[in-house]
Amino acid sequence: MEIKVGIKHVTREIVVDTNESADDVAKAFTEALANNTLLTLTDTHGRRVLVPAESVGYLDLGEENARPVGFGAV
């Protein structure tokens, strides 16, 4: 699933491809915001993105089961 994170006062957004569900990401964001901590997202390659929760302007949670596109799609 593709997640776009908009940061306050920053023109570019952060894009993370993750295997987590939309509900898991929303829950993690809610907890980070309530506790004034970092939102931690892990991408499909195991890299982590850490964002201060109070700096997040928006989260755009893409489709969870996006259809593969291309000739090799199975």
Image: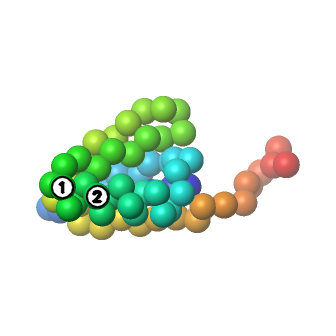
Q: Position of residue 34 (x, y in %)?
A: 20, 61
Q: Is residue 73 visible?
A: yes
Instruction: State the residue position of label 1.
Output: 35
How busy is the neighbourhood of tag 1: few (under 14 within 10 Å), some, or many (20 plus)? Answer: few
Mark identifier at residue 52: none
Residue situated in front as seen by the camera: 9 or 51? 51
Q: Can residue 6 be seen in this view?
A: no
Instruction: State the residue position of label 2.
Output: 31
Q: How far apart are marks 1 and 2 (CA)?
A: 6 Å
Residue situated in front as seen by the camera: 53 or 58? 53
Residue drawn at x 39%, y 45% is 41
Residue 1, quarter of the rendered image: bottom right
Secondary structure beneath disc 2? helix
Residue drawn at x 72%, y 60% is 67
* Left or right of residue 26, residue 1 in this image: right
Residue situated in front as seen by the camera: 57 or 20? 20
Residue drawn at x 77%, y 51% is 70
